[in-house]
Image (cartoon, rainbow, N blue to C red):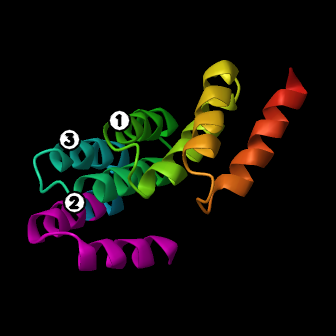
Amino acid sequence: MRMLVAAALIFVTASGAGAQALSNAIVQAHLGRGATSSQTLADQAFDLPAGDQPLLLAEAARIADRAAAPGVAADIRARLIAEYPDAPESGEASLALARHLAGPGGNAVEATRILEDLITRTPGAAVVPEARLELERLRSRS
């Protein structure tokens, strides 16, 4: 249900080409090709209008998550954060990427840096309380 609501919001705000790219990715994910479709959507996003790009990258990462492809999702989120650090989608992407990096075999130092950057760069963002909790968890492990 959450996926449908998020997709509907993107369909309303994205250009026709962005909505079409998202639609194609959702269909492919439904057919069991979620990891591939998320990567394709992320790649296509950069050829679409600038206003569509962070929206589509964020949704591509969510599609990868639902396809149990955390590495693909992390790569897409890293691209989103690097290319659009001031986009509203960057906060959620930063938190999710930090959580991924804080996991087993990850890079806790990089996760800490991402969380600290998120908290200081956008102190009023909705995800900051969660980011603070995640940062405390990371610090308590070391």
The numbered dot on residue 79 is 1
Residue corresponding to mark 2: 51
Whichever of labels 3 and 2 marks the residue nearer the N terminus, that label is: 3
Which residue is tagged 3?
43
Q: Is residue 23 magenta?
A: yes
Q: Nearer the viewer, residue 32 or 77?
A: 77
Work out whether residue 124 or residue 75 is closer to the camera in this orientation and state it: 124
Does 62 appear in magenta?
no
Q: Nearer the viewer, mark 1 or mark 3?
A: 1
Structural crowding at the residue carrying mark 2, measured as other residues with C-alpha within 10 Å and reported as few (<14), some (14–19) or many (≥20)? some
Q: Earlier in the sequence, mark 1 or mark 3?
A: 3
Name the amino acid, label 2.
Gly
Determine which quarter of the picture holds residue 52.
bottom left
Rendered location of residue 134, percent (x, y): 75, 42
Q: CA distance from mark 1 to mark 3?
A: 10 Å
Which residue is at 55% across, 38% downward? 97
Which class describes the residues within 10 Å of circle 3: few (<14), some (14-19), or many (20+)? some
Q: Main secondary structure of the magenta part?
A: helix
Closer mark to the observer between disc 2 and disc 1: 2
Q: Establish if 85 lies above or below 71.
A: below
Mark with earlier residue (2, 1):
2
**For the residues marked 2 and 1, what is the alpha-carbon distance in whole angstroms?**
15 Å
Instruction: Name the one closer to the observer, 34 or 137.
Output: 137
Quadrant location of the C terminus? top right
